[in-house]
Amino acid sequence: MRGITKSFPGVRALQGVDLDLATGEVLALLGENGAGKSTLIKVLGGAHVHEEGTIEIDGHVTAIANPHDSQVAGIGIIYQEFNLVPGLTVRENLFLGQEGGALRWINARSERERAKQLFRRLGVPIDPEAICGSLTVAQQQIIEIAKALAQDARIIVMDEPSAALTLKEVDSLFAIIRELKAQGIGIIYISHRLDEIFQIADRVTVLRDGTYVGTESIGSLTRQRMIEMMVGRSIDDEFPKEKAAIGEERLVVRNLCRGRAVKDVSLSVRRGEVVGLTGLVGAGRTETARLIFGADRLERGEIELDGNRLTINKPRDAIAAGICLLTEDRKSQGLVLGQTCLENFGLPNVTSFSRFGVLRHRHEQSAFTTYVDSLQIKLTDQNQLAGTLSGGNQQKIVLAKWLERNADVIIFDEPTRGIDVGAKYEIYLLINRLAAQGKAILMISSELPEVLGMSDRIVVMHEGRVTGEITDVVNATQEQVMNLAIA
């Protein structure tokens, strides 16, 4: 890709961007949220048409005006949100839109055999007749890869492929990627997890603010240099933890139970303390947070705030008591994407912005402006739709609405998932500020460096139970946490 330029109304998303991908290579495409990665990939996939520049494949200039052109050119795009039909079988999803056969009859037997060949090629046994919606995220990801291969893709783009995978599933994904490399397929790999980049990438291309920063081989890069290329400045400490004055217990939960997901979970968070709650995917961390917030009905257990026992049957009860939850999935649970940023900010704060039942828009706008400035939220105006923001800025909108509630307990569920390193740093600084104000913070994270870097205390779960607590976080190791997580 040479000199790719793409504009949207009022925004120059890409300005003269270059990208090279070799046969059998993994090229990591990095950059902060809003750097232009998604736009560049959508140009390659035919979802956007670029205004300037050229795309060459095997030395020939290729016109890509729509997704079909991209597919014909041998390009397969695997987006973060899978493009599968949950109610169809694996086979039907693999060949959707490619159905052949005489008299328009679908040759299911032939498709089934082709599907088996594709999975043998990937080294993963998946039943072609299984219903897609019944499979794990990791299996659905493999189906997306097989779908690209079924379309004879020679270039495969993977956008945040490991975001929802366990460590074991990530290892399996990397094994598949190495097999694809050996078959001569070029792979563009997008991820905010820098540790993965050093494991799987051959070279790294970095974008910043819609412009091309540079491309370097993985062997010539350090983690610090990679971060500097992405954010345009030096970040001396990736986890800028500051010690706050830790006081008395604010949130105390005892013997929380809900089915097999949460079994007798007890924990506490003190004033000014950041407690990291971690464990493998499926350990029950998110389920515990949902019980505290009233999103799921508690079967048994007690919840106390500042010594007072709470009855929480629904989120409104938790919000009224001073507990807020930044959900793991901000797009489906934390925001109403079709509403404006201002409307999302106002949702839990309507009462405080109203007088005699009438919403005071000017008061609401003024309050939101304060958070746009303090959190450095990047938006065109307050009426921009929340769904059009980058992941980091969406997270800040969710933060802003809860900060306006002045909650005493803030539960962060994967606060930096899908967020670039620069935005992560800002989230960490905000956590420090909240702790300094005496807030009690429960931070759920799968990122062990993040848990070790930002927690005052760590609680580890496995299969719905608390399996251990680490108080000497400064001297703790990832191995120590993992031993508790698999206990």
Image: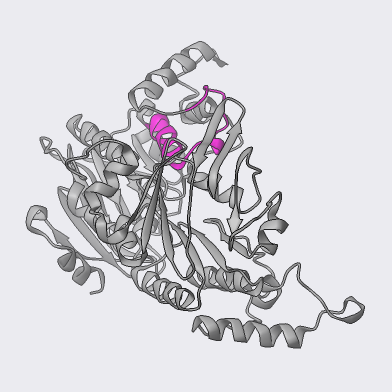
The part of the chain drawn in magenta is 379-402
Would you identify the image quadrant in which residue 475 lies?
A: bottom left
Residue drawn at the location 17% of the way across and 40% of the way down: 236
Would you identify the image quadrant in which residue 403 lies?
A: top left
- Whether 24 is drawn above or below 278: the answer is below
Residue 84: where, in percent of width, then height? 63, 64
Quadrant location of the C terminus in the rendered image: bottom left
Residue 364 left/right relative to 460: right
Residue 251: where, in percent of width, then height? 24, 44
- The mark tally for this picture is 0
Residue 394 left/right relative to 421: right
Q: Residue furthest right?
A: 103
Residue drawn at the location 18% of the way across and 50% of the way down: 453
Residue drawn at the location 44% of the way across and 67% of the way down: 25
Residue 416 left/right relative to 246: right
Q: Nearer the viewer, residue 81 or 458?
A: 81
- Residue 6 in magenta stretch: no
Magenta segment's dominant SS is helix
